[in-house]
Amino acid sequence: MAEVLTPEQIAMMAGDMTPKFLATRSAEGRPNVVPILSIQAADPRTVIFGEFLMWKTHDNLEADPRVAGLVITQDLRFFSFQARVREFVKTGPHFDQVSSSPLFRYNPYTGVRGVWVADLVEAEPVGRLSPLAVAAGFIGNRLGGPRVADEAGAGPGAASTGAQRRVMPAPVLEKVNRMQALKVVATRGHDFPAVFPDLSIQAIDPTSLRGGAGAFGRHYGESAVGRDTELAVAVLTADPVAYQIKGVVAATAGSKVAIRVTEAFTATPPVPGRRVDSGAAAIS
């Protein structure tokens, strides 16, 4: 069987604290993306990751075994992959490999419940983002672009009035508006979910985001993102709190997109999946 991962990609996955993200889909096809630092290569054709406080991801994996992952290193090298989950194990070499890693061996909350094993289908070549490209994209979105209309919703989950719309509270706004924050976008995709980095994303206001500026715009075109596309955005910083923001594309201008926010969640312990927007508390 042909190898999927290169030695460079396997090495990039090996870091316990290297940011790694997993995109899944619900039974209805809604995208979900969260940081899962335990993702690692068992061999060039297999990825494994631990089950740890990932309720929505667990449900999605049972509904649809097709996943997409993104690995991005401190020096801004990145690649994405597609895989199909084969099994969930609680014993054996894959379980031992994950549970013996420092991420779980010294975890203050609990050990790994089990390990998901997935067969790789494809991995994109390694790319690299330059600090200049990151800054240019961030500033490009700050200077202007499409906006979500104030009066009417567009697409799934949109509300008819501003008062009814979900909002991002101050801690979420602060994280998403950091230029140094890692921001990763997932869409439903086609055969598999699609996942890509967009460090240009920032909040226009507490109800909407803008993304797709500069070098990051090509990813939206490659993933066929347009008006009414549902998106999930993972936001990760050096702080021990991460968030997931869900929304729908309400407007486009060139490669840039305006995203109407529908939900916001925590994505880290002790309560990952807790709603932090103005909606009722839920796990997602």
Image (cartoon, helix red, strand yellow):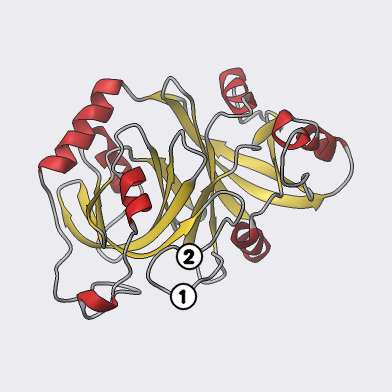
Question: In the depicted view, which residue is nearer to us: 259 or 243?
Answer: 243
Q: Position of residue 197 (x, y in %)?
A: 38, 39
Q: Is residue 170 left or right of residue 151?
A: right
| Res 219 seen here | yes
Question: Which residue corresponds to mark 1?
Answer: 280
Residue farthest right in this picture = 92
The percent coordinates of residue 124 (x first, y second) are 48, 33
Q: Residue at x 82, y 40 (%)?
A: 95
For label 2, the SS is loop
The percent position of residue 99, horizontal first and vertical second, equals 79, 37
Quote the CA–CA distance across marks 2 and 1: 7 Å
Compare residues 2 and 277 and report the one nearer the observer.
Answer: 277
Disc 2 designates what residue? Answer: 275
- Which sits earlier in the primary sequence, circle 2 or circle 1? 2
- Circles 2, 1 touching at the beta carbon (< 8 Å): yes
Q: Which mark is residue 170?
A: none
Q: Amino acid at mark 2?
A: Arg
Q: Quadrant of the C terminus?
A: bottom right
Residue occupying the point 48% across, 31% down: 79
The residue carrying pointer 1 sits among few (fewer than 14), some (14 to 19) or many (20 or more) residues within 10 Å by Cα, namely few
- At which x and y percent is residue 253? 14, 52
Q: Within the image, what quadrant is residue 107 found in?
A: top right
Q: Residue at x 52, y 51 (%)?
A: 267
Q: How many C-alpha atoms fall within 10 Å of the one at disc 2: few (<14), some, or many (≥20)? A: many
Residue 260 lies left or right of residue 234; in this view the side is left
Relative to 282, residue 216 above or below: above
Q: Quadrant of the N terminus?
A: top right
Judging from the image, what secondary structure is the residue with disc 1 in?
A: loop
Q: Residue type at mark 1: give it.
A: Ala
- Tell me if residue 178 comes above or below residue 52 in the rendering: above
